[in-house]
Image: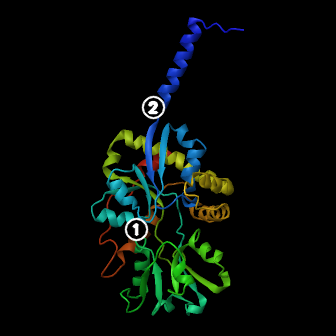
Amino acid sequence: MKFLMTATTAMAMALGAGALATGAAQAEDVTLQLKWVTQAQFAGYYVAKDKGFYEEEGLNVTILPGGPDVAPTQVIAGGGADVVVDWMPSALAAREKGLALVNIAQPYKSSGMMLTCMKDSGVATPADFKGKTLGVWFGGNEYPFLNWMNKLGLKTDGSDVTVLKQGFNVDPLLQKQAACISTMTYNEYWQVIDAGVKPEDLITFKYEDEGVATLEDGLYVMEDKLKDPAFEDKMVKFVRASMKGWKYAEENADEAAMIVLENDETGAQTESHQKRMMGEVAKLTAGSNGTLDPADYERTVAALMSGGSDPVITKAPEGAWTHQISDKALN
């Protein structure tokens, strides 16, 4: 049976196709630069994309993985991203040097950073760090550590502690090159365990517990962009959809981990590791609706300014955060 298309039908179909094309054309592009590789640390963004939360806001979001050679501050400075995920110490240090980054949302409420030590190294309390070699990440991640050492009255020039510039692995601990190494509660600590070390053979010192925690994994944009109403509106939509993704990930951790795996083009991640990571990450994002708590910000600034003769930042920043976006997105 042949289908005879009337002029009215043809016009309706054309209008429908035109509307779809227009809708697609109107989708606003957003590029997000992550602080590290594709993993559950960033699950909320991948979930928001996979579940259509960005699409519902009329956004076409491109998520760029990070890595050891990728500095989010440099990417956004060069115009390679609209918004970046970064730790506040790195962002504030960059701001003091002239890169006007502004925190527009804070999905992470708590810090996951800690030092993990072998008990047989003789470290039982932070007082035992003196005379030891400690592994530390650099590239902006060293700032909380340096502040902590200053608070303990320990010099990091080798006279009190020797700082080993740690790669993004746990080899220095396994190979006895360092008494302690930097780890995240959701990642490297478990790499040590997976390498065969028993939890009872380790001692951990969480920055959160030691009173030296600083804010991690916030969302940052360039200050001048916020003066553009169109950009502001786009970021409101982005933050709203992203936080919807984060809360979904918290409540559906295993599903979120699988979504992350589907987006891992390197094939380096495993299901068991990502599910475990997502469970730990959910503890850090819990309690945040995405709005930066000014008290958490002030605590971070105070920590970064308490570095004695070599503080991370030398004066309290002005305009380094705003509720301009989160108030509209989340309330």
**Secondary structure under the numbered disc 2 in the rendered image:** helix
In this rendering, position of residue 3 left or right of residue 229 = right
Using the rendered view, name the quadrant where residue 227 is placed.
Answer: top left
Q: Amino acid at mark 1?
A: Pro
Q: Can you identify the residue that label 1 sits on?
A: 89
Q: Residue furthest right?
A: 1
Q: CA distance from mark 1 to mark 2?
A: 36 Å
Residue 244 visible within the image: no
Q: Does 23 appear above or below 32?
A: above
Categorize mark 2 by other alpha carbons within 10 Å: few (<14), some (14-19), many (20+).
Answer: few
Find residue 303 and report its horizontal and vertical position in percent: 41, 74
The quarter of the picture where residue 302 lies is bottom left
Whether residue 121 is visible to the viewer of this picture, yes or no, is yes
| Foreground disc of the pair 1, 2 | 2
Residue 26 has which mark? Answer: 2
Relative to 14, say whether 168 is above or below: below
> Where is the N terminus found, in terms of image quarters?
top right
Residue at figure coordinates x 59%, y 58% from the top left? 267
> Between 180 and 148, which is closer to the camera in this rendering?
180
The structure residue drawn at horizontal position 60% and vertical position 73%, both measured from the top left corner, is 191
Q: Nearer the viewer, residue 37 or 250?
A: 37
Give the residue displayed 65% in from the left and 81% down from the top. 197
SS for tag 1? helix
Farthest-out residue, left: 98
Q: Position of residue 64 (x, y in %)?
A: 46, 52
Label of residue 172 in the image: none
Amino acid carrying label 2: it is Gln
